[in-house]
Image (tube, rainbow, N blue to C red):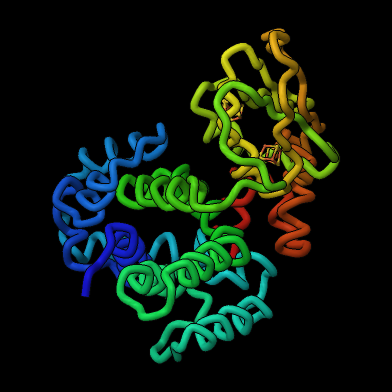
Amino acid sequence: MTRTLRSELYSALAEVFSDPPDWLALSGSQWPLYSIATDLALDSINARLALGKMEGISPEPIAIRQERYNALFSGPGRPRFWLHESLYRSGQLFGSETMDVEGIYRTAGLVIEGAELPDHVSVELAFLAYVANQQVNADQPSGTWVEIEQNFIKTHAGQWLPALGRALAECGDEVYAPIGQLLADWLMGSRQPLHHGYAPTTGLYTPVMQEVENCSLCGFCVQVCPRRVLSIHEDSSKTVLLYSGRSCNGCGKCVRICPARVLILRKLIPGAGTSGEMVVLSSSPRALCPKCGRPTVSQAELEYITGQMGYLPWLELCQECRFISMEDV
Ligand code: SF4
Ligand code: SF4
């Protein structure tokens, strides 16, 4: 069976989120994950950063790697990161997302056996690996399997794994931070079709904000912009998304990645170009930690996350108070 590099990347990511595989004990540059990602020639800044960090990871006994895994994903006490889609998105184990993904697996002819629930990150990634393989091996037209992959990313994996990956990228663990960064980058990349039916362009289009009240200030658009013309700035009272269009190439990456679908590409009037001045695309006051009163995330982001996960009191806390309350558990 021919295996594609894409399916190998999904598989390697699935392995590290299941239980640390033996190869994780090696130095980062010897990991299959590292060589697959290098062979894929991922060209985003974040992917290059993640690979650069992996290169610097020293070997470590697998038991220590396991301790890192446990500290992040299983406790003791509350794990720092949840690895089930339903927990991540609606705050409960075995929620509607669990049933939904199981139904999708069944439609693809798969029955999940084993200890993990169908919406565990490793199972979802293993499913994507299977689907990517089917694109070159199955009897059915490969377009069908491409569609299954894209739909699954759109409705499930892409709804929470980029956020999990981004959070991991900032967790401070030298092993799992670059893995998280790679996970986020891969799923946020050009996997999904352009929203609103726009085709890729070069320099003829510019992004425009619509329905600004739905922008969560998540910053995904900033991360993917190859020309760095989008940026997020915050002071103690507010967070703003800025756009300076002088060198925007109209590539549409920001439009594709936006989970709220509030960006569209608009055709430039010939010869008009953009002024290059900073334009505020979106703005929101910062939420305040109810315990210490320090500013935390933007109100818009807090509302978005609460909408996804339901109300959870610790979401409102700043990082520091969150850790203090976890220690109290
Ligand atoms: S425009 Fe979209 S991607 Fe950018 S910050 Fe707002 S919600 Fe996030
Ligand atoms: S269209 Fe491309 S270059 Fe322009 S702001 Fe969006 S991501 Fe950046």
Which residue is at 36% across, 36% downward? 43
> Residue 130, relative to residue 272: is it above or below?
below
Q: In the rendering, at what x and y percent does residue 44 appear?
A: 41, 35
Q: In the rendering, at what x and y percent does residue 30 appear?
A: 14, 51
Which residue is at 46% across, 71% downward? 145
- Foreground residue among 162 and 178: 162
> Residue 289, relative to residue 98: is it above or below?
above
Which residue is at 67% across, 69% downward? 91
Is residue 117 in view? yes
Is residue 277 in view? no
* Quadrant of res 203: top right
Ligand 2 sits in quadrant: top right
Q: In the rendering, at what x and y percent does residue 92 appear?
A: 66, 75
Which residue is at 39% across, 48% downward? 182
* Quadrant of res 138: bottom left
Q: Locate the N terminus by quadrant.
A: bottom left
Q: In the rendering, at what x and y percent does residue 139 appear?
A: 36, 80
> Residue 101, relative to residue 213: is it above or below?
below
Q: Locate the C terminus by quadrant.
A: bottom right
